Amino acid sequence: MTTFAVVRWCSTCRDDVAFEQPSCVDGHGLDCPDWACVQCGEAVIVGFADAQPVIAFHPTSHVA
């Protein structure tokens, strides 16, 4: 498999470093959303296709 790399900010390394896509075990192929820093291994996941909407709770009354 061909390895692709992009340069991004790594919050652990505190620098612009290369990120590569590890081998995808989920079957995404080149569309895999997983990326890992080549220096420290910090993982970055881009996009959540199956994400459920978040419903925020807003109280309707206040206690004074």
Image (spheres, rainbow, N blue to C red):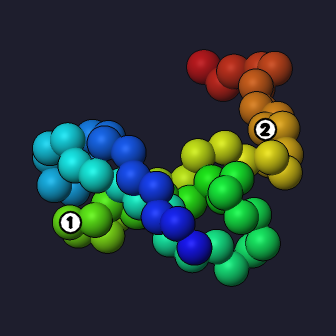
What is the secondary structure assignment of the residue under circle 1?
loop
| Near-viewer residue (64 or 56) | 56
Is the C terminus in the top left, top right, bottom left or bottom right quadrant? Answer: top right
Q: Is residue 11 visible?
A: no
Identified by mark 1, the residue type is Gln
Callout 1: few (<14), some (14-19), or many (20+) C-alpha neighbours within 10 Å?
few
Q: Please give the residue where the numbered disc 1 appears in the rendered image.
A: 39
Is residue 8 left or right of 56 when viewed as pictured?
left
Q: Is residue 22 above or below residue 34?
A: below
**Earlier-in-chain disc, 1 versus 2:** 1
Q: Is residue 64 above or below residue 56?
A: above
Residue located at (14% from left, 46% from top): 14
Is residue 28 left or right of 34 when viewed as pictured?
right
Rendering coords of residue 34 (x, y %): 56, 60
Q: Please give the residue where the numbered disc 2 appears in the rendered image.
A: 54
Q: Is residue 47 above or below residue 62?
A: below
